Structure formats: C-alpha cells, structure tokens
Image (cartoon, rainbow, N blue to C red):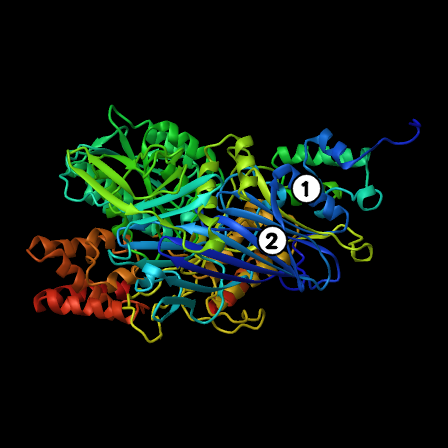
Amino acid sequence: MNERVKPQGCVLRATAISGRLQGLLGEITIAQTYRNAEPVNIEAVFTFPVPVEAVLLGVDIRIDDRVLQGRVLPRRQAENAYEDAVSGGDGAILLQEAGRGLYTVSVGNLLPGQTAQLRYRYALLSVWNGDTLRLQLPTTLAPRYGDPGQAGLQPHQIPTVDLDAENRFSLELELGGPLRRATVESPSHRINVEVSADVLRVRLVGGPALMDRDFILNIQGSAEARAALGLCAPDRDGWVALASFQPELAGHADVGGRDCVLVADCSGSMAGDSIAQTRDALLAILDRLQPTDRFNLIAFGSQPRAFFNSLHPVNDQGLAQARALVAGLDANMGGTEIGAALQLAYRQRQGQPLDILLMTDGEAWNAEALAVEARQSGCRIFAVGVGAAVAEGLVRGLAEATGGACEFVHPNEDMAARIVRHFERIRAPRAEAAMTWPAEPTRRLPEQVERVFSGDTLHLLAWLPTRPEGPATLNLTLNDGRRLSQGVTLEPWPVTETADTLPRLAAARRIAQLSAEAAAALAVDYQLVTPHTHFLMVDMRDEDQKATELPELRTVPHRLAAGWGGVGSVVAAAPCMAAMEPPAFERTTLLRRQPLPSSPPAPLAAPPPMPGAAQPSLSGGARAMFDTLREMAASAPKAAQKSLLGRAKTLLDALRKEAPPPTPPSATTAGTPADLTRWLEANAARLADPKQPLPTLAELAHAGLPGDLLARLRERVAQGETEDAVVAALLHAFLQHGPECRLPRNASRAIRARFRKQVSATLAAAVEPLVKTWCATG
Amino acid sequence: MDETLEPTFGIEELCGLTGVTRRTVRFYTQKGLLDPPEGERRGAYYTRRHLEQLLLIRKWQAAGVSLERIGQLLRGEWVELPPAPEPGTVEVWSRVTLRPGLEVHLEPGRLGLTPEETQELIQRLVAVTSQG
C-alpha cells in the first residue's frame, strides 16, 4: 500500500490538448488516456489545472470501445453515487472542481487491461491586452504553500509532485476567423506554425513535450482582428447577448500624486528565474514613479517586511535607498504568507486610494480567503504572475476582486513591458461606463462596469426578453470630461449545434454571485461543473464483470514545474518574432534549458538517461546526481557514537583537506567572474535585444562585479564617458577574458555591435586590463 | 441486539459519527491507514475498531501529522524522531561546496556518520558531481 512503490508505468498514458480559437471565443479540448497495465483493479485519481476562465462544456468518455455518457449532478448526490458504484464493483468516473482552474478526475474500478479515454471540452473567452491575446494553458501544478485541506481540497484531491513524472502532452491549435492572419509566438515552447487560407495551425516541434510548464501562445492581431464582437443566442425563454469591446482611452494627462505600494514575493518557490524577474520589475517600477507620488516597498516570505515605516515621497534619496534594497532581495524569506503582506500593504493607506503592485508566483493554497480580504480593503491590486507554471487562480482572483488587473510573465518574456502596461492602467483616467442594449435586459453581467482600462477587452453580458434587433452601445464618460461611444451589432450564434455554448458560458459567470443553493440549481440546469456540482458517469456492469475487491489507488503525480524554487532555469535564447507567411516553417525559438551543472551531461554508469529527453527538466547529469544522492542517503552507514563536538571537529578537518574550498557567499561587493557569467547567461534575451537598454553598472554590481572594479569603472563615467559605453567595454572584455560564457550568438553579437558603436579605443584600452586582472585573480 | 455482539456500523453511520466523507474513508482504506470493511461490496460494514482507527487518524491529522507518518504510527513503526531543537540549541552544520552552484548541508551527528564516513561520502559526492 505504499504509494511510493511505483507500479509499472504511469496510469496516465497520454494527454492531448487541442483547440480552436475563433477570435475571442475558443474551444479547448484536453484528452487524457488512462490504462490499467497492472494485474489488479485500480482507481486512477488526477488533480489537474485548466485555464481559470475555461468553462467545461462536456466530457466524452470511451472505455475500451464503448462510448459512455455522464451528466452533472448536485455534489452530494454525485459523490454518493460514485461511492456506491465503486464499492459495488461498477465502473465510474467522477469529475470535481477542486478550486479555481483545478479539476480532480477519479476513474474508479478500471479493471486490468482496460483503457479509459476522457475528452474534456472547455469554452474559453479570451481578452485582448493591447494588440496581444495571450493563451496560457497550464500543464502542471507547482508545489503550493499552505494547507490544501483548508482551501477545500479533500485528501484524495491533494496533488502530488514527482521529479521524475514522465507526463507529456501533445498540442494542436487552430486559429481561425479574425485570428487566421495573426502573428503568433510562444515564449514557453518551440512551435511549428502552418498557415493556410483560412486557418493557422500551431503544433509543438519534436512531438509531445514534458508537462512541466505552462504552454503560452502570444497572438498578435491587427486592429481589424480586434474589432468589437457582438453575439446572441436563444437562452431558455429569452435571449442572451455578449458584447466585447476594447476601449482606447489614450491621450490623457497624468496628474501624478498617487500612492503605490510594491509587494514582492521572496518566498523559497521564487528562487531562480522568478526572483530575478521580480527584481527587474521593481527597478522598472521605481524608474516610473512620479515625483508627486508616494510609495513603499514590502518584501515577504514567512513574514512581511516594509522598507519604510510609512509611504515615502518619491525623491532621489528614497529611490536610491529602494534600488539598493531591491538589489539585495532574494528568494530566502521562507513561506508564502501573501495575506500578511497584503494586510501590511492595506495599512499603508493614508487618506487617498492606494494601488498595490504585487509580484508573485501565486504558489499558495488560500487563494479564496485572500480575494475576500482584498475586496474589503478598498485598494486596487495590480498583480504580476511570474514563473513557468504560475498559479493563475490566485493572481487573477486578487486582481478581479479589487478592480485591478493582472499580467502573466514567462521567464522568457520582457518584464519591463508588462510593468509599463500596469502603470498605464494605474494612471488611466477613471471612466464611467454605461451600456445600451437593443431592449431593456432582465439581467446584466457585470451589473455595473467598475473598471475600464485602455486596450483591455471588456466583456458585457445581458439577458434579453426577445431576440435583440439593432446594435449594443458602450458609452464612456472619462473624468477629464471626454465622452466615447462604441457600438456593435449582435449577430446570432452561427452554428446551431453549439448554440448552447453562449448561454452556458454566461450562466457560468453568474455562479459566483449566487447562494450555494441557487448556484447548484443553475449549474445542474446548465450542466456546469462548479464547487456545488460534479460530473458523474456510472458504467453498470454485469455481475461477472464487477470488480470484487476495492480498487487500489493510483494518484497521477505532477512533474515538478520547470524552474520551480530555482531548480534549473527556464530562460531561453531570445525568442524571435516571425512573420506569418506561408509555407510552413519551423520556429527558431529554442527552448534550451540550462542544466544545473555548467558542463554538458555526461553518461554515467548508474542511472540510465531518460528516454526521449528532448526537454528534460533536469539534464542527464543533474538527474544522475539526484539519483546518486538518493541512493547514498538510503545507504548512509550508521556510526558508533562519539561526542558530537569531537566528530564535527574531525569532520571539518577532514573536509578542509579533502573537499574543494567552499566558495565565499556571493555578496554584492565580492562576486566572482562565474557569478557575472551566470547573470549574463540568465539575461541573454535582454542582451540580445538591441531595443533594450544595456545593464547599468549598479545592476552588474549586484550580478557579481566587485567593488574595486566597479569604482574604477565609475571613475570613467565621472570623466565623461557614458555609462553605456563603459558597460559595453566591460562586457566585451569580459567575454574575451572571463570564464566560458554560453551566451547565444545573437547576444554576444549584440554586445560586439554595441562595443564597436559606442566604445572609443582609449576607453577599450583602459577597461580591458582591469577586467583581465579581475578574471585572472577573481 | 445481542450484547455480546460488537456494534457494527454502515458506511453512512460511520461517516456521521466521525464527520469524514465516504470518499475519505475509502481513501484512508486505500492508503492502508484504515482496515478494509468487513463483508463484501454493498454489504460492507465497520466495527468499533474501524471507528477508533478513524478517530485516531482524524486526531493526528488535526495535529498536523502527515498521512505517511500516521501510517507508520498505526502499523506500530515507531521510528524515532530527532528531538525538536529547543531555542538555544547549538548544532554544527557543515556546508560543503561540491562545485559552484552545488552545496551539501550536513550534520554528521544526526546522520550518525564518523568523520571517515563523512569524508568518504563527500568524496563520493564530489566524484559523482564532477562527472555530471
């Protein structure tokens, strides 16, 4: 019964994600294949993530060759029926919502040799942010902080994480309608894009990929592709209508005088890529504060820490202090007590509205309690979700609860651009929105439009007594007196067979506002899986086919999220945008994982390399190390008792002789050339981009440049050289004399280009020997 | 009912008495924490022993003990726990860099290693990691 004894192969054999996006509306299908290759009867259980906004439309089930039907029932009824079926020896499948964007499927009494195929069909209503529509499909659940039980998960729903889980997914997406001429790129995976006359197809290069990170597709559309959308469909006795607008409110004067608290997650799970991105983001924010603003900075882990006692004016001294503090932030503050940090942030409020910019990976379980508190605070939260497998529900929930907004940034994406967008939102004029429908609606959603941000899609729903004739119009009154108006014709849903999609999507959006009883009734009526309802399929078997024993539990583990807690880095070579011209081509975006050790994986005697290790989350070498460490830990010899102190002392002597000398902890003033190399490798994408500024000396100081060298370089700046030129000279010399730096060619080329353009021969001659000496001695 | 017979419970009754859902009762059974019910399939029933086990599991769970550990305790595997360090306890942890970016933190006293064994362990680790 020990769950760690692995049965042969994983019970989850395959995951296939497919989907079609037709403008803002899309349908995503996740197909999972479970196979029982064991001699015993089993129950397979898997808690898996889906996009938070996805609405489950249906589950198609096939067991071996039989197609089976299930339906949505009130929670208690479904649970009892499932238990009855399992204890009675019948086959049964139960699908429960385990939280926002989280589902648990149980495949009960899967008999030896049986295969169950489940296809979950979801509707997804996306949004444009500026010219980009971001499709984010989660594939794994990173370990989360806190108690899943308190977040409402039952013991069997609690996901497990395994470093070795070999789950893979295939992907096939189709972009049609207004998106067929869009430009697409993926910061997370190598993709293959095939263009035909009316559809654009996206697949993964190299076949199924490991489920260790979100799949992200950034879809850039022209203004035409982003035109307002109006749809209507019959719904019970009346009609339901959806109008989606992307209002542009540009051209206002910013008055400043705002209060802003920056809250940075420094918990252990942020280590590596995420904390580096957070530091970048904070620096970008500090650069954009206005002299009339006030700010504070809170870093948190197990405890929150505010850098100033209260809101601090934005002046040179305050900014300099804050920059120094940001440079010293690390993912070393322990747990993820977001609640305590936000409460400290809410308390900063002094007399006027307060905006909070929160940077986190959201890996905590108590998302719903946090959203309730946030709503009561009266502050707006602008959240930035970071990491390769971010917990979307928490980040989105906080933004939605407070009338703020959220952005998600993959380690390969540019953080600064997202921060700028958030700032535009924060500084946007307050707008009052009024919606006119062709007839007086019996219900609207949202009842009151509370937030309008320039360039962000606004979805408005209305239930109408009769079929709408004529346009729906959005009227905006800005607080600078301007009035804007935009209209859209409500087209009838084009395909009769799927005409219930819109009513069900609309019903799903109402659930959160209803009492438990009303929500359960609505969810059963519209066949929606919600916290109050489950999907159930029971396969009644003939007496001789019934399972005789209780099934053994097989929980499908998740692959540890790439880059989680600093386990390797996900930062890849700079993704390059490509024009969408036929014929098909292979994207050059290379997702190269940086292996834990700096040399290429070498074959080892002990553990075999993974099969098909196209994108291992750990390189072969690192994996071998883990395995060896595990073995060693298991077989550590037991020694005779000695005095602790005596043994420790001898040990230290022994270590001094035998082990390589420990490297001193890296401080901001005494880094090694290797530190700087690592920093450059981690920032390769930025270095390769000629539009991005070169790193500053202060940043490089944090990255490992020693104090004495820094002082010599600063002298050059004081003598009239530009900082950019000095940095270019430094980087150029460092690439020649420093440790081998595995920068992609476009990054090193960009550095050489800047060196040629900006650095005089005198400066180059002055800087090179300094760098050479440091590299030789450091 | 004959008083010499032990009282028995149906699954609903057991759930009502303990506040545990049917699914969780079954989950504990699958995990080997709770004995399987007596009787077959839908005729299954539970006894006082099951009730006691279930209440014990709940109690330990509420105290923050992991399911794995509860399993060990129930099976009588009293694996000795290292004493929780009191405030003021001094422990000497060694931090050994195997190569830049890879460290081992160890406390040989707790590991029960002699210096020679520790030295050998480090050497083996260095050997393994330098190939990786």
Q: Is residue A148 visible?
A: no
Total labels: the figure holds 2
Q: Nearer the viewer, residue A733 or A487?
A: A487
Percent x, y of residue A343: 38, 30
SS for tag 1?
helix
* In this picture, residue A61 sits left or right of residue A583: right
Residue at label 2?
B113
Percent x, y of residue A70: 63, 50
* Numbered circle sitting on residue B23: 1
Q: Nearer the viewer, mark 1 or mark 2?
A: 1
Mark 1 and mark 2 lie on one chain; the one further toward the N terminus is 1
- Label 2 packing within 10 angstroms: few (<14), some (14-19), many (20+): many
Q: Chain of mark 1?
A: B
Percent x, y of residue A199: 37, 66
The quadrant holding residue A716 is: bottom left
Q: Is residue A452 above or below residue A656?
A: above
